Every structure is written in structure tokens, then in C-alpha cells.
Amino acid sequence: QEQLVESGGALVQPGGSLRLSCTAFTCEGSRFVFSWNSMSWYRQAAGKEREFVADITPESDRSIYADSVKGRFTISRDNSQNVLYLEMNSLNSEDTAVYYCRRTGHNLWGRGTPVTVFS
């Protein structure tokens, strides 16, 4: 069974940086091939709906970002390791949320990793 596992969430002060990781685990016979799929990051703050953060194509030739993170966050991937990354800089309190990775366009999500920006 396919599984996405996020890591890297932490407490950080405003202006700080974090790098989140999402590792894709597959099993023999799985139809999910990480390197063939676009991958996304989403986040959900307490009391709010889950929102899109960033997406990257299989060969990393194109990425898109939510306006709220553009210029501060960078999505990347390592297909040789089945890992998706989210580099987050200039963090502020509005970035506090649980961050999830997703196989774009599919109902395959990780369980999330919490990021808290506090002063």
C-alpha cells in the first residue's frame, strides 16, 4: 500500500526557516510511481480549511505556489529517493499549520507535520 510520510515540522520563531520532507513508500505491484507524478503541499491551520501551498511536476520543470507563500517557499523533489521537499523561509504566524503532502490529483495524503511559528 502506498504511503506518504511527512517530517520536519517544528516550533520556529518569526523570520525563521524550516525544510519539510515527504517520503513516498510503495510496495511491489503498486501503481504509484513517485517519479511519474506531480506532487503537492497543502496546509491546514486550526479552524480553517485545508489550503493549497505548492505543486511540482514530475521532472521538476514547473512549480506553482499560493500567493501567500510565493517568494518565501520553494518546493523541490528527489526522484531517486522518492522524497518531496518544502523549503520555507521568512516564516510568520500565518504559516502556522499542519502541512500535508499529496499525490496531486489523487486521494493519497500524508498524515501531516505541524509547523508552529511563535514569538
Image (cartoon, helix red, strand yellow):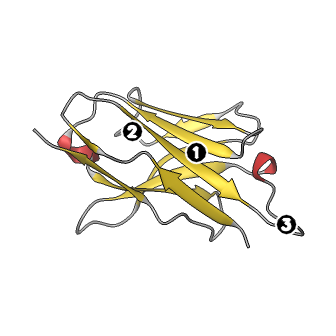
Asked if residue 51 is positioned above or below residue 60 in the image, the reply reads below
Would you name the residue on which mark 2 appears?
67
- Quarter of the figure with residue 29: bottom right
Q: Secondary structure at mark 2?
A: loop
Disc 1 crowd, CA 10 A, few/some/many (<14, 14-19, 20+): many
Disc 2 crowd, CA 10 A, few/some/many (<14, 14-19, 20+): few
Question: 110 or 7: which is nearer to us?
Answer: 7
Q: Earlier in the sequence, mark 1 or mark 3?
A: 3
- Quarter of the figure with residue 83: top right
Q: Report the residue at 66% width, 33% height from top.
A: 62
Q: Position of residue 20 (x, y in %)?
A: 46, 42
Would you name the residue on which mark 3 appears?
31
Question: 84 or 36: which is nearer to us?
Answer: 84
Question: 58 or 22: which is nearer to us?
Answer: 22
Q: Secondary structure at mark 3?
A: loop
Give amino acid for label 1: Asp
Q: Earlier in the sequence, mark 3 or mark 2?
A: 3
Q: Is mark 1 in CB contact (under 8 Å) with mark 2?
A: no
110 left or right, relative to 91: right
Give amino acid for label 2: Asp
Mark drawn on residue 55: 1
Give amino acid for label 3: Arg
Q: Position of residue 65 (x, y in %)?
A: 48, 39
Q: Position of residue 46 (x, y in %)?
A: 24, 65
Q: Earlier in the sequence, mark 1 or mark 2?
A: 1
